[in-house]
Amino acid sequence: MSNFIQVTPFMHVEDIDRALTFFTNILGFETQLRVSNYAYVHRETAGFRILEQKGADGAPPGNRRFAYYIDVRDVDRLYAELKPKLDTLPKGDVYGPVNQSYGQRELLVLAPDGNLIAFGQAIGGA
């Protein structure tokens, strides 16, 4: 049995409350821990460690400097589930689902702090 469980990246944000609202109300994650400027959110087998750092050199909205990729089995099913809430986001913050030339079908969502979250599945035997 493998000793590794999962990867839980740190996401640095300017406003932790706004980030938690995005993850829980839009993407369907559950906040499992919240302490001061730190939180852990989880959904199925994916988790994020969110750290609020006021004035830190994070990803300004629209910068898309940081990308988080979550592999899923059915990106269209996820999109159908999330669509009513994704429709509440600003125009241009959601892209896809779309087939990419590198063999992935992807849904891209821009988080409030400019962090790009990608959900993808292999297609075409990739």
Image: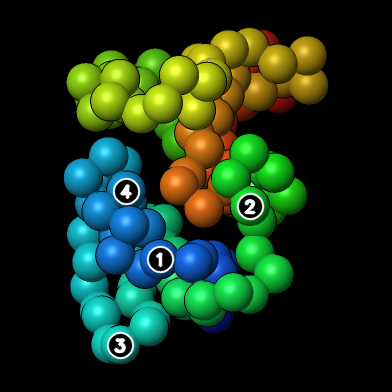
Local crowd at mark 1 within 10 Å, few (<14), some, or many (≥20)? some
Q: Amino acid at mark 2?
A: Pro
Image coords of residue 6 (percent x, y): 50, 67
Task: Report the mark closest to the observer, 1 or 4.
Answer: 1
- Of mark 3 and mark 2, the one earlier in the sequence is 3
> Residue sitting at 22 percent across and 59 percent down?
30
Mark 4, residue position = 22
Q: Which residue position holds label 3?
A: 36
* Number of marks in the rendered image: 4
Q: Check disc 4 and give the amino acid type.
A: Phe
**Callout 3: helix, strand or loop?**
loop
Q: Which mark is residue 15?
A: 1
Distance between the alpha carbons at the discs numbered 4 and 2: 16 Å
Question: Residue at image x 29%, y 65%?
Answer: 17
Q: Position of residue 76 (x, y in %)?
A: 39, 17
45 shown above or below 28? below
Residue 60 has which mark? Answer: 2
Q: Tag 2: Cα neighbours inside 10 Å, few (<14), some, or many (≥20)?
A: some
Spatial distance from mark 3 to mark 2, Cα to Cα?
22 Å
